Every structure is written in C-alpha cells, then in structure tokens.
Amino acid sequence: QVQLMESGGGLVQAGGSLRLSCAASGSIFSINVMGWYRQTPGKQRESVAFISSGGSTNYADSVKGRFTISRDNAKYTMYLQMNSLKPEDTAVYYCNLRQSTGGYWGQGTQVTVSS
C-alpha cells in the first residue's frame, strides 16, 4: 500500500507563489510516475504536471512556464513550485502516484488565489 500526503496549500494573491509538497510512504517501487492534479467544484479533475522516476516532465498548457514539478527520490517527495498564480488556478490540488501495483491519491490541499 502507498500513502500520499500533500502540504503547502493556502491563500495567495494573484501573481504570488506557492510550493506544494507530496510525501510518499509505503511500498513504493523504484519505477513510477508521480503527478499533480487539480479539481474545482462541479468540474472533472484535471492533470497539472507529471514527473517520472527518471525525471521526465510533462505540463498542462495552462501552467507551462509558471509551474515547475520536481522530485527527490531519496526523500520520496514530489514538489510543485507555482509562480505567477492566477485566480483560475484556485482548486484542490491532489498528488498521484502510479506504479505497477496501481494508482494512489493523496487527500488534497486547497489552493486559493485572490484577485
């Protein structure tokens, strides 16, 4: 089993920055993909960014150039540096890990960007 715990959400003004963290624990395999998703009420959960255990990254068009995903494999932790935040980035952000045993989710952390 895998457990994921997000932290770092909060309230920030437009143009500001936040850094989210996702700490993973449990039976984590060396080959996996971790990612961030976000969801607002009444909408489907959408992908924000992914990073493989080898360091390859992929971003949603809406966050390219503003968000940076990274990970520290030794600490089993993933990060999302969010800069130039916009009100439309307001959402609950979820951490996800996928490996051969399946996909796992964190409980989410709220990010609110005020205009």
Image (cartoon, rainbow, N blue to C red):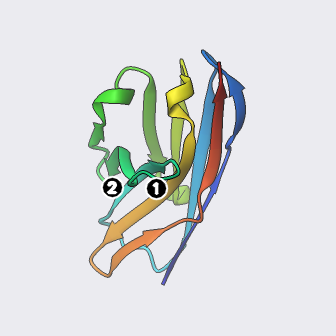
> In terms of depth relative to the viewer, which is nearer, 107 or 30?
107
Is 11 on the left or on the right of 15, as rendered? right
Residue at 32% x, 45% y: name it.
55
Q: Is residue 64 above or below residue 52?
A: above
Instruction: Determine whether the residue tagged by mark 2 lies in a helix, strand or loop.
Output: loop
Q: Is residue 69 above or below residue 115?
A: below
Residue 90: give x, y in percent of width and height: 57, 36
- Is there CB contact under 8 Å for labels 1 and 2? yes
Whole-number angstrom distance, CA of label 1 to CA of label 2: 7 Å
Residue at 73% x, 33% y: name it.
11
- Amino acid at circle 1: Asn
Residue at 51% x, 32% y: name it.
89
Residue annotated with mark 1 = 73
Residue at 59% x, 48% y: name it.
21
Residue 33: give x, y in percent of width and height: 32, 59
Instruction: Determine whether the residue tagged by mark 1 lies in a helix, strand or loop.
Output: helix
- Label 1 crowd bin: few (<14), some (14–19), many (20+), radius 10 Å: few
> Which residue is farthest front?
42
Disc on res. 53: 2
Residue 115: give x, y in percent of width and height: 65, 18
Give whichever of discs 1 and 2 has the lower sequence position. 2
> In terms of depth relative to the viewer, which is nearer, 73 or 9?
9
Disc on res. 108: none
- Amino acid at circle 2: Ser
- Label 2 crowd bin: few (<14), some (14–19), many (20+), radius 10 Å: some
Residue 22: give x, y in percent of width and height: 56, 55
Is 10 on the left or on the right of 26, as rendered? right
Q: Is residue 56 above or below residue 81?
A: below
Task: Give the mark count.
Answer: 2
Is 103 on the left or on the right of 71, as rendered? left
